[in-house]
Amino acid sequence: MPKVLWVGLPLLIAAALLAVLVLRGRAPSRHAVNIGASVLLLAYVATTASLGIFWVANQQLPVFDWHYLFGYGTVLLVSLHLVFNFPVVWRFLARRRKMAAETAPGYAAAAQGRRGLLGVLGAIVATGAAFVLGLRHGRSELAIGASSAGGSLSGATSSDAVATALSVVERFHAFSSHSRAGVLTRAPGVDWGDPPPPFKRYAGASLLRLPAPGKARAANLDLAALGDVLWHTTGVTETRGGLYLRASPSSGALFSTELYIAARALPGLAPGLWHYDSQSHGLERLREAAPDELLLGAIGDESLRDAPALVAATAIFRRTGHKYRDRTYRYVLADLGHALENLRVAAGAIGVPARFVAAFDEARAAQTLGVDEAEEGVLAVIGLGASVPAVALRAPKPASLASSDSPAPRWLAPSPSTAGASLGVTAAVHAATSLRAASAPASAAQSSPLYLPQEFIELPPPIHVARDWLRTIATRRSVRRYASTPLSQQVLAAVLSRMTTLHGRMLSTAVRVNVVVHAVAGLAPGAYRYEPARHALLQRRGPTVLREAARAAALDQDVIGDAAAVFVLTIDRAAFAADPLGPARGYRHAFLEAGLVGERVYLEAAARGLGACAVGAFYDDEAAGLVGVDPVREWVVHFAALGVRG
């Protein structure tokens, strides 16, 4: 039964009972109806409050559907309660001690009855209007049809197709931008349906249990090392209040990322395609395949033929989309960037090289994996055990996919009613950023000029702490409450250094790091741009940038207003437009890179006993003004709070 019926069931039962009594000539008194409505109101208020407290306490923030549905019921009952008790309020406000009922009892009673009936009808109409308005605002995604993003993009390599792909990206970014006025101008869009389950299961697939995390000893990539890398990327690290927390953070704890392994020459694992089941920490066998059939047709670097295993990372769009809707593609890319940074760090800690593949054909990869690209997009490919360089950029050669006679086990789709339905702008931007749609660089907005000729503020040399990074990943948590204790400049310098120069850039050069200083010893509050080459800060806005402005820009989230410092990541439009694989693909790479950089804040903070929390919900225009960037040249894509745990 749908949630709205479950939530409204007590009201429906009460209404049905009232109707039966009226039909039987035993209509309850006004006082009895008031008492019954008050009891229901108490129950709905208690349920709404307890649900909110439970989810906030467990940081299970995405499950607000029950909460707001009970809220609508509460509003209806409050309205009914006010209708019954309005005469008391009116007498108090009007200061009238004698009512018209004393002089004309019959007329007053009839008028009071009519007012009560009109009040009840008005409450029902107002609640229904609020519900419809909520649906309008909640489903705000504006679909881009095939005329905008299809057809001409499929398999296209011309300059017109590249320009079209970039146009789709720009439209998507505009549609998915938040503003205070935007909630009143959005149009209804995709019906995302019920969310898929948090874990993907394949019917009929055999499960190979992986060794427990921490068993890897040698630098060679074997089954234990693979298990360690996968677990520290998306594995379940803690169960809290029925919520499975993972090694990498995710927007709303929705965890859209799935991992697949193409095993070629890995000790302890038969060649073939495997799916990582993060809940059981095991591998589901999808099908056997010869080593040369495994994803190599989707990538263009022959040197990866010596990689013992390839990892393909996907995102199940509906898992995130049922909550975040038109911002879904932003969130799944940033979340995947967080996970990929964990993969890189974990592989490095074990001594296994991890090589990011920038140029891969996601359509071919999806066909090889047997996933529906409209529902689950392939967003990254990584070679494990491959030699340097760290990133493969060469485009794949045209070739047909090798196939296997044995079909892959079927994924048990959770929402047959919505499977295959268009995901609107999310599907459009995924197609636009595909290798085939955006396969050549194109010029866009000019690069941001050097900022106001102010003096640079030199930061102390970074002092990095030696840590067990595998343990750091395993114990990392998002922290949303901070003490008022200021950070030292040494800590800020170390975090900024790790975000940028320490590890370099994996997929994009377009990410820029800004920091809003609330409480850092020796630094005036304000907004600064970090210049990695000089390891220095350049002030963009002065002390007028206060906690209240940062909190307001981040949808009034206290985590941003209470932190000692807030990193605001932007992407330079000219830089991602110059991506070797095209401007639209450069947009995807820039968002993934922002996620990689954001995860470094988490890891450095955890290593130092500090708290960090990534935030992807903000008013785009206010965020740009907060750090003083020109939204024509740079787009704000990510917030990350840092502070002393409260």
Image: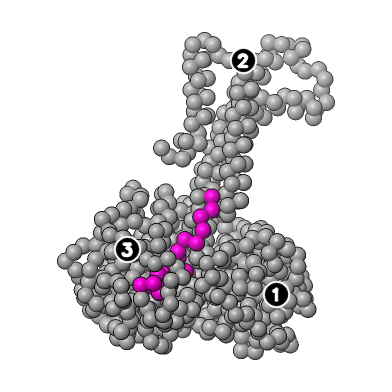
Give, as a three-letter code, the residue at label 2.
Ser
Q: Which residues are magenta?
A: 223-241
User: Measured from the top left, where is residue 254 in percent x and y?
Assistant: 48, 57
Identify residue for label 2: 29
Give, as a three-letter code, the residue at label 1.
Ala
Say whether residue 230 is magenta.
yes
Who's the residue at 52% across and 43% down the image?
Answer: 66
CA–CA distance in space, label 1 to label 3: 51 Å
Q: Residues within 10 Å of mark 2 (few under 14, many from 20)?
A: few
Does dot 2 land on a helix, a strand or a loop?
loop
Farthest residue, direction left: 405
Mark in front: 2 vs 3: 3
Q: Residues within 10 Å of mark 1 (few under 14, many from 20)?
A: many
Q: Main secondary structure of the magenta part?
A: helix
Identify residue for label 3: 208
Given residues 495 and 164, the one toward you in this image is 495
Identify residue for label 1: 527
